[in-house]
Amino acid sequence: MFHGIDLYSDVVTQPTPGMRKAIAEAEVGDEQRGEDPTTARLESMAAAVLGKEAATFLPSATMANEIALRLHIEPGDVIIAAANAHIFFAETGGPAVHAGALARPIETNDGTFTGQDVERRCTWPVGPHFPRTRLVSVENTTNMDGGIPWDMNRLADVVSVAKRNNLKLHLDGSRLMNAVVASGVSADAIARSFDTVTLCLSKGLGCPMGALLAHAVCDTDRIRRLKQLMGGALRQSGMVAAAGIYALTHHIDRLADDHSNARYLAELLSDISDIVLEKPPATNMLFFRLRDPQKEKTFAERCLSNGIRFCLVGTNRFRAVTHLNITRADIERAVVLVRKSLG
Ligand SMILES: *Cc1c(COP(=O)(O)O)cnc(C)c1O
């Protein structure tokens, strides 16, 4: 465990005392048999928040995404998503392994794209030679592309093109609540046109693990079968689901603090001439590089020994993520440590 100021990711959050209490007091049963009351409660709560008929609790958002892809497509079918989407860069090739997907990535500036970008990738003729374009996956907020919440007009454009072309729509809303808090648009309004929606509990929402896949009732049986197939069916999962209920109740509005801490970090780092910020943070993420790329390795090492951790996400590209264990005072201390690490 890293004992400094950990801006590596919002996955490093520790369960709060209130969350630990909810975990300790959870009523539990065998989830695999549908007998865990707390998991069932979380699932209906999440379905309501996301404006879907049903939701299924899963161990991780990766599994939620992979089940969704498997649900929507047949082997050989095409999925369209941003080139840096988590499903392409960080799920171990799962779309190919689990769903047999053919990927058509869209190169983007910020992880968002247009209806025309989609249209261009699904105008292939219909016939025995051609793979079928079947699914558009949208990441909101975008992760590697800046933690950006989608503009609602841009989203509506993608949705209408997808519908016109009979494509299914998946929302990788692992950080959907960051988009909700940053944009002021409700989760169900963002999720409305999507067939499936992933929500991660173990990022900014602060749970030790877990995710939800929201979907239509008619897909419940297939999703439960895929969950079992992937080894994701659980036993007394109410222990974890209780944390999810706690997070959906207490940890959404507070994401605004993480966003303001990210902006504060950007403001303080912008005074350091050795550091070049990519773009102003829109949610809880900030990306930067060093003016002198030669210093990357030493800087990364010195940061760790000085007690601050970032995620190195490419050549001379660092990501800082704020979360519920980072205070405004930590941000000030972080900047002192950055200066020290630059030497
Ligand atoms: C973290 C993340 C996931 C996967 O979440 P896990 O719960 O860690 O499996 C999926 N999509 C995006 C955009 C993410 O940031």
Image (cartoon, rainbow, N blue to C red):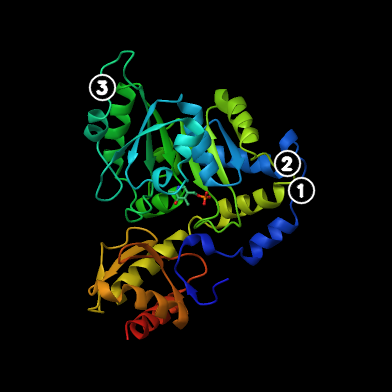
Mark 1 in CB contact with mark 2 (< 8 angstroms): yes
148, 312: nearer the viewer? 312
203, 179: nearer the viewer? 203
Tell me what residue is drawn at x 70 percent, y 56 percent. 23
Residue 1 sits in which quadrant? bottom right
On screen, 133 above or below 306? above
Task: Please tell me how crowded label 1 is: few (under 14), some (14-19), or many (20+) other residues with Cα within 10 Å.
Answer: some
Residue 80 sits in which quadrant? top left
Tell me what residue is drawn at x 61 percent, y 57 percent. 208
What is the x, y in percent for residue 236? 74, 46
Instruction: Quickly name the residue at label 1.
Output: 27
Q: Nearer the viewer, mark 2 or mark 3?
A: 3
**Left or right, 305 with reference to 242:** left
Mark 2 in CB contact with mark 3 (< 8 angstroms): no
Instruction: Quickly name the residue at label 2.
Output: 37
Marks 2/3: CA–CA distance: 47 Å
Q: Which residue is at the far top?
A: 127
**Left or right, 343 with reference to 189:** left
